[in-house]
Amino acid sequence: MSETPSMRTRFIWETSASLLTFVALATLFSSIDLFEWLYEFSRAHEDYELDDVFAALMALPAILLIIVIRRLVDLKREMALRVNAQETARHLASVDPLTGLANRFQFFIDIKQTLSFGLRKKACYALFHIDLDRFKQINDRYGPVVGDGVLKQVANLIEDRLDDQDLLARVSSDEFLLLKPYKRRSDVTDLGQYLVSLLDRSFQYQGVEHSVTASIGIAINDDFTPQNYLNSERLMTSADIAMFTAKSNGRNRCEVYHPTMRQKFEEQTILGDDLIRACEQKEFEAFFQPLVDAQTFDVVGAEALVRWRHPTRGFLAPAEFLDTAETLGLISQIDQAMLEEAIKIRHKIEDSGLVAPRISVNISADRLKSPLFLHMVRNINVDPASLIFEISEAVTFDTLDDMSRYNLEALAEQGFEVEIDDFGSGRASILSLLEMEPKRLKIDRNLIAPIIASEGSRKLVKSVVDMATALGVEVVAEGVETLEHANILAAQGCRLLQGYYFATPMPSDHFIQFLHEKSGSKQATSELSA
Ligand code: C2E
Ligand code: CA
Ligand code: CA
């Protein structure tokens, strides 16, 4: 138990003051001739019972002594309570209350101490930055209590594998830092892989299974120049950058830091800043790619695909910025911008006297689960029959949260059609997807590309078409790059086709011109055949 200097001073003061009072009174009594004084006193107060007066006078020092002792005991107890409270506060400030692991601040102190000790022993250390993938979805869907339950289990799982010299901390919601000494470098990568597979599992909480994976970045500390070895901030930044790289490379994996990663990370940071500006400056534009009827090749629809009109780099494709936009929570704004562009082009086409095709827009998982989604859709004042919403297969029915389900049902009630996009690109089963009762299924272009060369691929596509058709769901094929693809797919029962064979995505003006040309050539053909 440690006492603070001010408490110690107070204790000394109060003890000294009490003792001094006691000594002063004792001296006073001894300095006068007590018995003579008592005799005079009793003569002057003959009416009183002398025994009582004596007793009172004799008791006085004893009472004072008791008061002093009690005060000292109270003071001691108060000091003990204060020291306890200070220790509890210090403990709370250094420990993560959820997992009982060290928190960020404690880790910063511990890593510095460990490294300064390690430098003397020339010990190599590896820092692991462990970040759970899509943990936010568990939190959003099941609430923070369930999220906390999963986090505790993750922490226990890692903690059980630690040795005495390892430092482990939870440094933010779903991020952990682990500092570990090592002998051989291969031990570090082995442990990284092991942790990835350890965390790739389902955690049971309140009777529900929650799947979790982790992305891990590793930074190595084996350069014994003191300014490098002791630079714990740099070590932590490097592990963070390696973790970011693991996320960019597809998540559920680990990466060891290399200086080349820093450049990409900095580029991403600049991209993020640029994207925020692009949203404010409305730099996103929709390109439109036609969808044709598989039997007649007539244009019956178009998909709005976002392009970023970058001030210095020209038009950028979604692959260059959508992931970052998703991470920054900007994707809903982009989707909304595309929806508005889709409505604008419908009006333009109608105004130019053509029959306007239906326009498909993509909805991200973020937007689908937004409580504002319906409000935005209701505000757009458009005939529901003119729009189609495409939801990526990644948003499977099993993992759909209540808000997304509600939004999907409300869309259908208002007469909008919903389509499952990128079918066959992920792990979702066809049955779980069909539970969403989509109007259409769009087969991913990676399943379409090999159908010419591979009979197996043809059979696979045919079985998807048959299963969907049996359930009353239409099938669209995307990535149709040749006439041969188109013919095979039409013969297999696909209703609609989309791909470079018919047209690449184009700016709105070009698309309107494209429609004019198509309607002109159609008219010419029908006039010729008449
Ligand atoms: P997606 O929804 O599957 O869109 C089709 C993608 O395939 C488009 O790429 C299109 O240009 C490309 N494509 C079309 N035909 C062919 C073909 O014959 N061969 C090949 N190799 N590719 C073809 P894009 O425009 O780069 O878009 C990529 C993805 O970005 C889209 O895939 C979609 O998932 C996403 N995306 C695009 N616009 C939006 C948007 O406004 N919101 C959201 N949330 N996502 C969007
Ligand atoms: Ca799409
Ligand atoms: Ca697609």
Image (cartoon, rainbow, N blue to C red):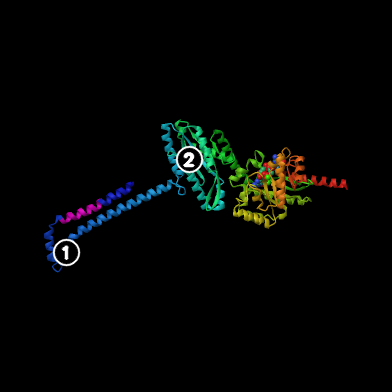
Circle nearer the N terminus (2, 1): 1
- Against 414, residue 361 (above or below) is above
As shown in the figure, which amino acid type bears the numbered disc 2? Leu
- Against 167, residue 419 (above or below) is below
Residue position marked by numbered label 2 in the rendering: 178
Residue 7 visible in the snapshot? yes
Which one is nearer the viewer's eye here, 25 or 516?
Answer: 516
Q: Is mark 1 within 8 Å of ligand 1?
A: no
* Helix, strand or loop status at disc 2: strand
Residue 246's x, y, as percent? Answer: 56, 39
Residue position marked by numbered label 1 in the rendering: 53
As shown in the figure, which amino acid type bears the numbered disc 1? Val
Residue 429's x, y, as percent? Answer: 64, 48
Instruction: Look at discs 2 and 1 and give the one toward the viewer.
Output: 2
Q: Which residues are magenta?
A: 16-29
Is 507 left, or right, of 268 in this rendering? Answer: right
Which one is nearer the viewer's eye here, 444 or 466?
Answer: 466
Residue 217 visible in the snapshot? no
